[in-house]
Structure formats: C-alpha cells, structure tokens
Image: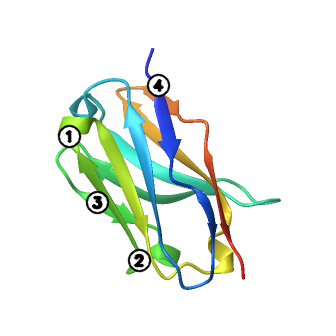
Amino acid sequence: QVQLVESGGGLVQPGGSLRLSCAASENIFRFNTMGWYRQAPGKQRELVAFITSNGITNYADPVKGRFTISRDIAKNTVYLQMNSLNPEDTAVYYCRATKLASEYWGQGTQVTVSS
C-alpha cells in the first residue's frame, strides 16, 4: 500500500515562504506523476504543481513564478517551495501520486497565510 506523508505546513505572514515535503513509501520513479493540490475552505480541490517521472514540471497559473516543485530521489521525497505567499494561498495542501490507473493521496497539511 502506497503511503504519502506531507509535512512542512504552518502559519506564515504574507510575503513569507514555506517548504512542503511529501515522503513516499516507495521509489518515486515508480510513479507517473507526483504533485501538489490544495483545497481552500468552501472551494474545490485544485492543482498546484506536478512533476513527471522524467522530471517535467507544470504549474497552475496562480503560483507560477512563486512556487517550485522538486524531488530528491534518494529520499523518495517531493518538495514544494512556496515563496511570496499571500492570503489566497491559505489552504490544505495535499500530495498526490499516480501510477498507471491508480492514484494516491496524502492526508494533507495546513498552510495559513495571515498577518
């Protein structure tokens, strides 16, 4: 059973930075994609960014230029570096991995941007 464990969320002031981590229970090369989604209160879950097994990255428009997705293959971990955070980034952030027709989700980590 694949497990994804997120960490790194918290409270940050506007303009600040956070780095989220998603640790997988198996070699991340086995996944077709790994990505980050977020869900704000009263809103639908939305894509933030993803990275493919061959290293191609993709970002949602609201985070382009501010967020960076990366991975450490040796640690089976994917990261989301978030800079220039604003209150609209407040949400629960989820890690997602896909493998063939299956998808796996982490439990989520709360990010709150507030002064």
Question: What is the distance, in whole Å, between disc 3 and disc 1 at their CAs?
Answer: 15 Å
Say if mark 2 contacts mark 4, CB within 8 Å: no
Checking the image for residue 73, the label placed there is 1
Nearest to N terminus: mark 2 or mark 4: 4
Find numbered disc 3 in the image and state the secondary structure of the residue it sits on.
strand
Find numbered disc 4 in the image and state the secondary structure of the residue it sits on.
loop
Q: Amino acid at mark 4?
A: Gln
Coloring scheme of the render?
A: rainbow
Q: Amino acid at mark 1?
A: Ile
Question: What is the distance, in whole Å, between disc 2 and disc 4 at their CAs?
Answer: 28 Å
Q: Amino acid at mark 2?
A: Lys
Dot 3, how many residues are within 10 Å of its Cα: few (below 14), some (14-19), or many (20+)?
some
Q: Which residue is mark 4?
A: 3
Nearest to N terminus: mark 2 or mark 3: 3
Rendered location of residue 78, percent (x, y): 34, 47
**Nearest to viewer (mark 1 / mark 2):** 1
Q: Which residue is mark 2?
A: 64
Nearest to N terminus: mark 1 or mark 4: 4
Rendered location of residue 73, percent (x, y): 20, 40
Rendered location of residue 14, percent (x, y): 61, 83
Horizontal arrangement in the rendering, residue 106 relative to residue 29 (left or right): right
Rendered location of residue 98, percent (x, y): 40, 34
Horizontal arrangement in the rendering, residue 25 relative to residue 54 (left or right): right
**Nearest to viewer (mark 3 / mark 4):** 4
Q: Which residue is mark 3?
A: 57
Say if mark 3 contacts mark 1, CB within 8 Å: no
**Nearest to viewer (mark 2 / mark 4):** 4
Residue at the top extreme, as displayed: 1
Seen at 37% across and 43% down, the residue is: 34
Seen at 35% across and 27% down, the residue is: 100
